[in-house]
Amino acid sequence: MLSALVLICSMAVTPDIRDCSRDNATAVMRVPSDFGNPTTCFMHGQAYLAETSIGREVTANERVKVVCASSKAADTVVRRAPAQ
């Protein structure tokens, strides 16, 4: 299964989006669902961001990067939020 990590990066720090990583991102979010294929993962990552206040407040000097990784690997990067 795949997990989506949504990274918000400043263009001042990482002008090339390929250099955007969890280490230099201004915000890192993990979508609380897992996905069976990359297309679904990317689409849900974008949709999840759009539903958040962080997504609505992205400035012209920031860029968004959605990274889909195995759920096991994502667990080591950003822990899953507990269910409420």
Image (spheres, grey):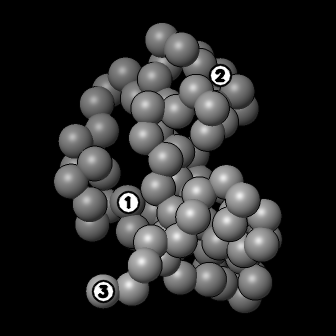
| Mark 1 Cα-neighbour bin, 10 Å: few <14, some 14–19, many ≥20 | many
Residue bearing the label numbered 2 = 16
| Mark 2 Cα-neighbour bin, 10 Å: few <14, some 14–19, many ≥20 | few
Q: Position of residue 24 (x, y in %)?
A: 58, 27
Q: Position of residue 81 (x, y in %)?
A: 44, 72
Q: Amino acid at mark 2?
A: Asp
Snapshot quadrant of residue 51:
bottom left
| Earlier residue among tags 3 and 1 | 1
Does residue 29 lie above or below 62 as drawn?
below
Does residue 2 lie above or below 10 as drawn?
below
Farthest top residue? 12
Q: Secondary structure at mark 3?
A: loop
| Quadrant of the image containing the C terminus | bottom left
Q: Residue at x 39, y 68 (%)?
A: 48
State yes or no: discs 3 and 2 in contact (Cβ < 8 Å). no
Q: Amino acid at mark 1?
A: Leu
Which callout, 3 or 2, points to the residue nearer the camera?
3
Q: Residue at x 52, y 33 (%)?
A: 25
Label ID, residue 62? none
Observer-nearest of 42 and 21: 21
Residue bearing the label numbered 3 = 84
Residue bearing the label numbered 1 = 49
| Earlier residue among tags 3 and 2 | 2
| Quadrant of the image containing the N terminus | bottom right
Q: Amino acid at mark 3?
A: Gln
Q: Residue at x 71, y 32 (%)?
A: 18
Snapshot quadrant of residue 34:
bottom right
